[in-house]
Image (cartoon, grey):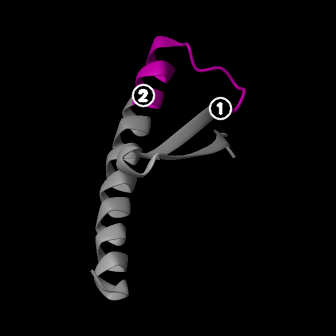
Amino acid sequence: MDQEQRNNAIRRFLKQVGIQSHQELDQLLADAEKAGTLGGEPVKVVMTLSVPSLDFEHRIAGELSKE
């Protein structure tokens, strides 16, 4: 796999991750808001990228706020 093929494969994967993650988070937050369990505080989130065949894991933490 050359660099261009590798970059394209990574982009396709990240696009899929981004779309699916956005949909899941949107639904989760909408449901929590309807249930009254979503307070005014930022929601802490963590995304974990793992590549088991290469024994690799990377975590990204952040917050979702109403701002």
Disc 2 target residue:
28
Q: Secondary structure at mark 2?
A: helix
Q: Is residue 56 left or right of residue 65?
A: left
- The residue range painted magenta reads 28-42
What whole-number distance in Å separates the C-alpha atoms at marks 1 and 2?
13 Å
Residue 4 lies in quadrant: bottom left
Q: Position of residue 20 (x, y in %)?
A: 32, 46
Q: Secondary structure at mark 1?
A: strand
Three-letter amino acid code of the residue under disc 1:
Lys
- Quadrant (top left, top right, bottom left, bottom right) of the N terminus: bottom left
What is the count of numbered marks?
2
Q: Who is closer to the viewer here, 21 or 66? A: 21
Question: Earlier along the polypeptide chain: callout 1 or callout 2?
Answer: 2
Mark 2, Cα crowd under 10 Å, few <14 / some 14-19 / many 20+, is: few
Q: Position of residue 65 (x, y in %)?
A: 67, 40
Mark 1, Cα crowd under 10 Å, few <14 / some 14-19 / many 20+, is: few
Q: Is residue 31 left or right of residue 61?
A: left
**In the image, residue 15 lies in the stretch drawn in magenta:** no
* Residue at (39, 55) in percent of width and height: 18
Q: Is residue 10 above or below residue 32?
A: below
Three-letter amino acid code of the residue under disc 2:
Leu
Disc 1 target residue:
44
**In the image, residue 40 lies in the stretch drawn in magenta:** yes
